[in-house]
Amino acid sequence: MIVMKFGGTSVEDAKSMQRVIQIIRKEQSRQPIVVLSAIAGATNTLLNAARTAQEGRLDEAILALNNLLDRHVTLMENLIDNRTSVQQIIAVSRRRLEELRNLCNGIAILGELTNRSLDAIASVGELLSSQILSEALRSQNLPVKWVDARTFMITDNEFVTAAPQFEIIDVKAREILAPIVSSKTIVVTQGFIGSNANGITTTLGRGGGDYSASIIGAAMGAEEIQIWTDVDGVLTADPRITPSAQKLRTISFREAAELAYFGAKVLHPSTIFPAVKKDIPVIVLNSKRPDNTGTRIVSRPPKTNIPVKSIACKRGITVVNVQSLRMLMAYGFLESIFSVFNKYETSVDLVSTSEVAVSLTIDNTATLDKIIAELSTFAEVSILEKQGILCIVGDQMRSSAGVADQIFHALKDINLVMISQGASEINMSIVIEESKIDEAVKRLHEHFFEPISATDMFEPVGGK
Ligand code: ADP
Ligand code: ASP
Ligand code: MG
């Protein structure tokens, strides 16, 4: 069996959903489990409606929800021919939206919006889209069963960024999904959403649909995990920055994990982890051009001597400089610093140290004031905001001389705030001012990948 995950851009309207149905039909014999995202923009609309309600603008929130329902109704009417099916699914959608309106009403009255409510509201996007797809497949005579992901995607209680409980999921997913799959019925379920042990809805964090697909694939021992999106595969850089980005034919799990972690939005940062554990290939494919072979992410890609494969970048980074109050770093200094970040559950991306100082980067500044106050009891602290990270990735970087020189040359007049050769030796990460990120990515891309030519490793976007 295979897992096929379709992102929001693959199900934005009836035309794109119809394409998705064709793709699923083609793979029917491989016993697909389909994991679906909300239609494009729906999650943002839902979360904004919740915030608008909290700010007391209930009418505005309700209007946004009604418009979202209209979008779904138009989608159903254009997609499903059978009038009875359409009426049924419209009724289901109306009920879900009614629940949402009540929730927003409560939020507006209390003026309080908890993460638990945010998850309850966000989950509706995936529930609606998956019910529509399921009904559309049925109306086209495909054997299908809609499964509520909250019955098996069990997580902890960290609403908004819930952690999946792998052992329980393994058991529940097999128990619930295996009989459906073996009866040659297509499973349609939701990405992104889960529930805690008490059955309360949680979510895996924004963009978490990819992660869901990988978790389900690993639990079910899938042959492959397909991530269908709106680009040809994993590209040499974000195509929104460098439209000339090329497609990578194959990359390693390690390369993909670094790229995803450092900002390549095409994959949620946690996607690779479950796939690696079971050594299941992850294939990134374009639902708008389904004949393209996509990018294969595997444990051992074919050997190459190309040092740099791709460039990722992340914005909204804060650098925290921590200087020891003594002349030298005392024993235990690093531990004291990290224990503060630990205490406030703030993860650190890059670290570089000198004799007396440590620089760290974080992207979550929710508790930064408390972190600074606590660090200041034993060190001098300064902050640099509006920074960005460039991440240059390639398995062969560790055995190639001169790559750093080329990187620095390409960035020669840009001030490099921090430099870190990743511990895995397959990436180099550089902190620069956020406003210079686009320019830096363009220059690095031009140096390492242009002019474009098809090779064993790369392929111009738009090819087969
Ligand atoms: P989906 O809705 O399918 O989950 P996303 O918007 O989350 O789609 O991810 C796909 C987008 O990721 C692409 O449209 C592209 O703009 C962006 N992206 C950023 N970096 C890369 C990269 N290195 N390769 C491919 N796409 C990238
Ligand atoms: N719909 C969710 C989001 O927009 C999850 C996903 O698309 O992967 O974040
Ligand atoms: Mg995504």
Image (tube, helix red, strand yellow):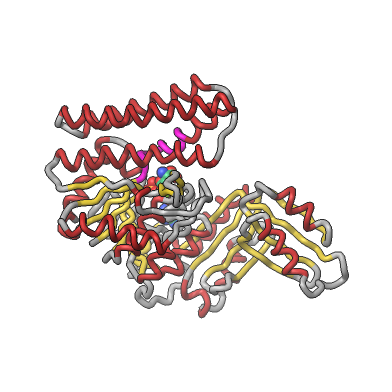
Q: Tell me which residue sits at (33%, 25%) in the image.
A: 70
Please name whichever residue, 2 or 382, is drawn nearer the observer in this view of the structure: 2
Please name whichever residue, 408 or 214, is drawn nearer the observer in this view of the structure: 214
Which segment is the magenta one?
A: 37-46
Where, quadrant-wise, is the C terminus in this rendering? bottom left
Where, quadrant-wise, is the N terminus in this rendering? bottom left
Quadrant of residue 291 within the rendered picture: bottom left
In this orientation, does residue 266 appear?
yes
Q: Is residue 248 left or right of residue 420?
A: left
Q: Tell me which residue sits at (55%, 50%) in the image.
A: 438
Residue 147 position, x and y percent, is: 28, 47
User: Does the stretch in magenta take in 319?
Assistant: no
For residue 265, above or below residue 39: below
Please name whichever residue, 320 or 245, is drawn nearer the observer in this view of the structure: 320
User: Does the stretch in magenta take in 38?
Assistant: yes
Residue 167 position, x and y percent, is: 41, 64
Please identify the residue farthest to the front as the structure is shown: 198
For residue 408, above or below residue 79: below
Quadrant of residue 254 within the rendered picture: bottom left
Q: Tell me which residue sits at (58%, 50%) in the image.
A: 315
For residue 126, above or below residue 4: above
Q: Is residue 115 left or right of residue 346?
A: left
Residue 245 position, x and y percent, is: 42, 55
Q: Count of labels shown?
A: 0
Residue 49 position, x and y percent, is: 49, 30
Please identify the residue farthest to the left as the structure is shown: 141
In this orientation, does residue 239 appear?
no
